[in-house]
Image (cartoon, coloured by chain):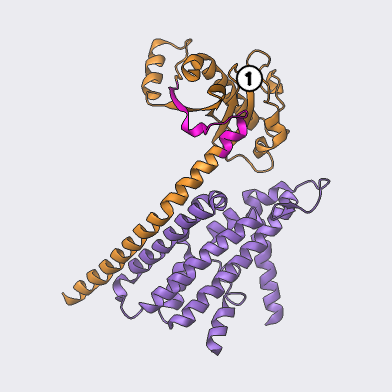
């Protein structure tokens, strides 16, 4: 029981995939122009991560070492395609906003990284917890970056105009360079906080 | 030998299972996806058309788009012909009591960040009823403002006869957006070309 909670919490702060392991940067930088996108992308990645972690962990004794990467990729790609189709069918607007980044989850390093580093050495339940934790950590990180960028660059949060019409949007924040700047500052902040804690 | 066989069998089984589950999911989501796509399309079409009592996507007509220009030389003409050989425009018709009250079709022009797609609705006499931006990748906060209602509303009631189809900077009648002239220019160009296209093929479209 104890190990389950440890594995769950691990991904949220100590090994946060974005701020600590710094994986999956491509989609993080690209889709965080709005807080809403962060939720959609986070949910999709969490689903794929949990499913692939469970399946890979369950099959860890069956899959031969030599073809393990090929097997992982097939499994991950299958779940990603499922998410892609389901989103297109039932969350059309969100799917349109995500565009190419849903199919690209296949090559998101977080997922293959967790399969390699965790799921193929740990029991099914622990792997599931790891997937949930990593997914939550990823979603929270996207949400933080996305909220800051949307608030600065558009004066709104989740599409609601918070800062009023007198606010002059700081456009750079929603342009690509803004993604790097905001992410960099947050990474620095996290490092500082961690130093204090240690 | 046994090793290799094991590799092949395990990877093979995983692939087969993956293929079957994907086929199943595709089957389940096929109809909802088609429905959503049609709904989204219909929504933009309805937004630019005058009131009607039919389903515009069931009353359509394909018109070939001729990009060949009269002022160009013969060679250019031939080239444009082969290039635009298969290009057609799908025209949606709005009917009320069997009468055509408007038509809608999609045009595109190159903006700052790629092509901008414009769905435009016209009254039968060739006046713009409304436009919607269907696709674009302009700069957020600058060029992307072509999607705002205040920009799109400028086009209402405009026709080739009563309006100069250029942005103000180029001596026309349309407001550009401060900091972004290329995107509005592209939208205006798309609408102008759409109107010219309609003028040329009016008979074929209406009947």
Q: Is residue B47 in the magenta section?
A: yes
* Residue B166 to residue A164: above or below: above
Residue receiving disc 1: B127
Q: Which image quadrant is residue B177 in?
A: top right
Would you say residue A184 is visible in this rendering? no
Front one among A37 and B139: A37
Residue A119 lies left or right of residue B55; in this view the side is left
Rate crowding at label 1 as few (under 14), some (14 to 19) or many (20 or more) other CA atoms within 10 Å.
some
> Percent x, y for residue A117?
45, 76
Quadrant housing the C terminus of chain A: bottom right
Q: Which residue is drawn at 29% across and 73% down?
A: A66
Would you say residue B33 is visible in this rendering? yes
> Percent x, y for residue B108?
53, 30
Q: Residue at x 43, y 81 (%)?
A: A124
Question: Total number of numbered labels?
Answer: 1
Q: Residue at x 60, y 77 (%)?
A: A14
* Residue B205 to residue B42: above or below: above
* Residue B99 to residue B51: above or below: above
- Residue lying at the far right of the rendered structure: A166
Q: Which chain carries label 1?
A: B
Front one among B21 and A112: B21
Q: The purple chain is which one?
A: A
Residue A61 lies left or right of residue B40; in this view the side is left
> Percent x, y for residue A195?
68, 78
- Residue lying at the far left of the rendered structure: B1
Front one among B130 and B5: B130
Quadrant housing the N terminus of chain A: bottom right
Q: Which chain is orange?
A: B
Q: Is residue B94 in the magenta section?
A: no
> Percent x, y for residue A149?
69, 55
Circle 1 sits in a helix, a strand or a loop, which is it?
A: loop
- Provide the residue span drawn in magenta: B43-65
């Amino acid at each position: 029981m104890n190990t389950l909670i440890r594995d769950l919490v691990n991904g949220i702060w100590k090994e946060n995939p974005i701020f600590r392991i710094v994986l999956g940067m491509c989609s993080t930088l690209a889709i965080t122009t709005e807080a809403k996108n962060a939720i959609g992308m986070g949910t999709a990645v969490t689903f794929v991560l949990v499913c692939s972690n469970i399946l890979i962990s369950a099959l860890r004794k069956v899959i031969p070492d030599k073809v393990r990467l090929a097997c992982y990729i097939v499994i991950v790609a299958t779940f990603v395609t499922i998410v892609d189709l389901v989103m297109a069918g039932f969350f059309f607007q969100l799917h349109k906003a995500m565009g190419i980044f849903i199919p690209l989850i296949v090559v998101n390093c977080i997922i293959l990284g967790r399969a390699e580093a965790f799921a193929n050495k740990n029991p099914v339940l622990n792997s599931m917890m790891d997937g949930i934790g990593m997914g939550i950590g990823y979603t929270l990180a996207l949400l933080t970056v996305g909220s800051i960028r949307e608030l600065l660059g558009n004066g709104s949060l989740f599409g609601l105009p918070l800062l009023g019409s007198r606010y002059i949007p700081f456009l750079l924040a929603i342009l690509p360079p803004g993604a790097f700047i905001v992410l960099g500052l947050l990474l620095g902040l996290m490092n500082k906080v961690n130093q204090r804690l240690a | 030998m046994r090793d290799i066989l094991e590799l092949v069998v395990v990877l093979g089984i995983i692939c087969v299972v993956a293929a079957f589950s994907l086929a199943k999911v595709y089957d389940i989501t096929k109809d909802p996806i088609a429905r959503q796509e049609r709904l989204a399309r219909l929504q933009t079409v309805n937004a630019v058309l005058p009131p009607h009592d039919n389903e515009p996507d069931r009353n359509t007509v394909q018109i070939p788009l001729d990009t060949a220009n009269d002022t160009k030389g013969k060679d250019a003409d031939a080239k444009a012909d082969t290039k635009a050989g298969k290009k057609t425009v799908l025209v949606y018709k709005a009917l009320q009591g069997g009468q055509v009250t408007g038509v809608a079709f999609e045009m595109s022009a190159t903006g700052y960040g790629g092509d901008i797609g414009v769905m435009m609705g016209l009254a039968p006499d060739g006046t713009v009823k409304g436009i919607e931006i269907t696709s674009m990748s302009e700069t957020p906060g600058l060029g992307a403002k072509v999607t705002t209602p205040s920009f799109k509303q400028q086009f209402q009631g405009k026709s080739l006869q009563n309006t100069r189809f250029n942005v103000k900077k180029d001596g026309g009648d349309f407001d550009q957006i401060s900091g972004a002239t290329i995107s509005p220019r592209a939208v205006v160009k798309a609408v102008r070309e759409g109107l010219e296209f309609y003028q040329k093929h009016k008979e074929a479209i209406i009947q």
